[in-house]
Image (spheres, rainbow, N blue to C red):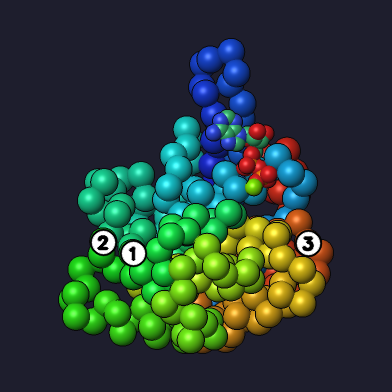
Amino acid sequence: MVELKNITKTYNPKKANEFTALKNVSLTINDGEMTAIIGRSGAGKSTLLHILACIDNYQSGEYRIDDTLVKKLSERELARIRGEKIGMVMQDFALVEDFSALENVMLPLDFARKKKSNRRDLALGALSSVGLVELAKKPVSKLSGGQKQRVAIARAIVNEPSLILADEPTGALDTKTSAEIMDVFKRLNDEGKTIVIVTHDPNVAKQCERVVEISDGEIV
Ligand SMILES: Nc1ncnc2c1ncn2[C@@H]1O[C@H](COP(=O)(O)OP(=O)(O)O)[C@@H](O)[C@H]1O
Ligand SMILES: [Mg+2]
């Protein structure tokens, strides 16, 4: 379970360009839920997701993952929680273009304490679960948008996280490819993963069991 309580996030605090992107946001997401976070561009969706992913800080409020208070953690403990519990699919894929699909998916395993000899098999397993194993050796630069998104998902799940966070995962994809990517998320959810998808596509939101709307930094 993840729990945000009264989170306020201000960019550039005390400067002329100070901007409060999240105001007093409280949100609980239970294990196994599939949640969509919707809202206009600039509403604070990515900010919220980055806090859930423990890759961004906040000025006030509390964030707990499985009852662990995140702000009390050392850098080292934080890195460990990120590596073991959280898989993040970034908005622009954030893949290494001249690496192969397999090399990209192996990257997080270099940071996790996984045996070197197992890494390749784990990465191939993740690629196979997104239906891409036959393209494992292909450089990412040669893949289509939908295939890149699958690589990004495989990389997010290779450490078997319980929480998968995805930022506009279908934003750059056509309708058919979006549906295929949503099928991947639905299957992961059926397997017990907790999924949070940021989207402005009503079709994507409709496929999630829960929809949370954010407007001007507040949950509505
Ligand atoms: N690094 C940053 N510095 C300053 N302002 C930012 C930064 N990142 C986002 N913002 C601002 O915070 C607001 C929310 O951004 P974001 O969470 O990216 O919205 P969304 O993902 O819903 O489009 C926007 O007004 C954006 O301009
Ligand atoms: Mg965004």
Contact check, label 3 and label 1, Cβ < 8 Å:
no
Q: Residue at x 59, y 85 (%)?
A: 187
Q: What element carries label 1?
A: helix
For mark 3, does the 10 Å Cα neighbourhood hold few (<14), some (14 to 19), or many (20 or more) residues? some
Of the image marks 3 and 1, the number of the one nearer the N terminus:
1
Q: What element carries label 2?
A: helix
User: Tag 1: residue type?
Assistant: Leu
- What type is the residue that disc 2 sits on? Phe
Q: Which mark is residue 13?
A: none
Label 1 and label 2: CA atoms lie apart by: 7 Å
Pointer 3: what residue?
Answer: 201
Residue 94 screen position, x and y as percent: 49, 55
Residue 48, position as x, y percentages in the image:
57, 48
User: Is 22 or 172 nearer to us in this picture?
Assistant: 172
Q: Position of residue 208 (x, y in %)?
A: 70, 73
Q: Which residue does the numbered mark 2 point to in the structure image?
A: 111
Drawn side of residue 17 relative to residue 158, left or right: right
Label 3 residue near ligand 2, CB within 8 Å: no
Residue 162 can be seen, yes or no:
no
Q: Is residue 167 visible?
A: yes
The mark that comes first in sequence, 2 or 3, is 2
Mark 3 belongs to which amino acid? Asp
How many numbered marks, from 0 up?
3
